[in-house]
Image (spheres, rainbow, N blue to C red):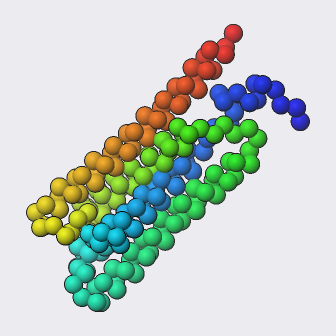
């Protein structure tokens, strides 16, 4: 099969699998939360504000089990994203872009923070970001977590948009 210069043009190549990057970003967001906030800093566990404060061995065991289930679900996100990336890598002349990869990862990570922060912290009250401080300060840590997620989501969306506009400009410039 003969390839022409046009088939190697990023503007006409198959699109980068954004959903793969978003899935990996969701998983990485979950891993960061679980590893850094749950395990290393020990600020909270998945159910530490839902009637299982880590004040007894039984509660700590319960939380550890649910932290593990949480980690397993984030692992599934990463695995699904990697499968999508692997499949895309076998497409002829897929145009790989660092901006699209980083942008989609940031969108996924930011989505994780926003969904987890709104659902688990605010609506369900399963836990809060930093439960080692006095309860009246939990909301500030929760809001900071949401702001961090929003900043990642917006930054990722801007990267994706800038790359899309670059490709669009190349298509426009290539039109006779």
Is residue 142 shown left or right of residue 95?
Answer: left
The percent coordinates of residue 20 (x first, y second) are 57, 51
Above or below, 13 against 147 in this view is above
Q: In this view, does 69 lie above or below 60?
A: above
Say how many tags the image has: 0
**Residue 51 placement (x, y as % from top left):** 23, 79
**Quarter holding residue 55:** bottom left
- Residue at the extreme front: 40
Look at the image and tell me whether residue 14 can be seen: yes
Residue at the image position 48 percent from the left and 48 percent from the top: 105
The residue lying at 40 percent from left, 61 percent from top is 32
Q: State the image coordinates of residue 1 (x, y, percent, origin top left).
A: 89, 36
- In the displayed structure, 16 sits above or below 62; it is above
Image: 45 above or below 86:
below
Q: Residue furthest right?
A: 1
In the image, 2: left or right of 120? right
Which residue is at 44% across, 41% downward?
Answer: 156
- The residue lying at 34 percent from left, 52 percent from top is 114
Q: In which quarter of the image is the C terminus?
A: top right
Q: Which of 40 and 174 is in front in this view?
A: 40
Residue 132 location (% of width, % of height): 19, 70
Residue 125: in sight, yes or no? no
């Amino acid at each position: 099969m003969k390839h022409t210069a046009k088939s190697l043009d990023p503007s006409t190549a198959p699109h980068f699998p954004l959903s793969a990057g978003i899935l990996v970003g969701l998983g990485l967001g979950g891993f960061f939360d679980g590893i850094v906030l749950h395990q290393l800093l020990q600020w909270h566990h998945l159910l530490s504000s839902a009637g299982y404060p880590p004040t007894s061995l039984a509660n700590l065991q319960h939380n550890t089990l649910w932290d593990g289930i949480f980690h397993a679900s984030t692992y599934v996100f990463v695995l699904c994203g990697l499968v999508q990336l692997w499949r895309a890598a076998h497409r002829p002349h897929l145009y790989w872009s660092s901006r699209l990869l980083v942008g989609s990862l940031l969108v996924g990570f930011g989505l994780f923070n926003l969904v987890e922060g709104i659902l688990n912290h605010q609506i369900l009250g399963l836990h809060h970001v930093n439960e080692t401080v006095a309860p009246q300060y939990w909301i500030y840590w929760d809001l900071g977590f949401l702001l961090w997620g929003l900043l990642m989501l917006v930054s990722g969306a801007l990267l994706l948009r800038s790359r899309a506009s670059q490709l669009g400009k190349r298509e426009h410039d290539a039109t006779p």
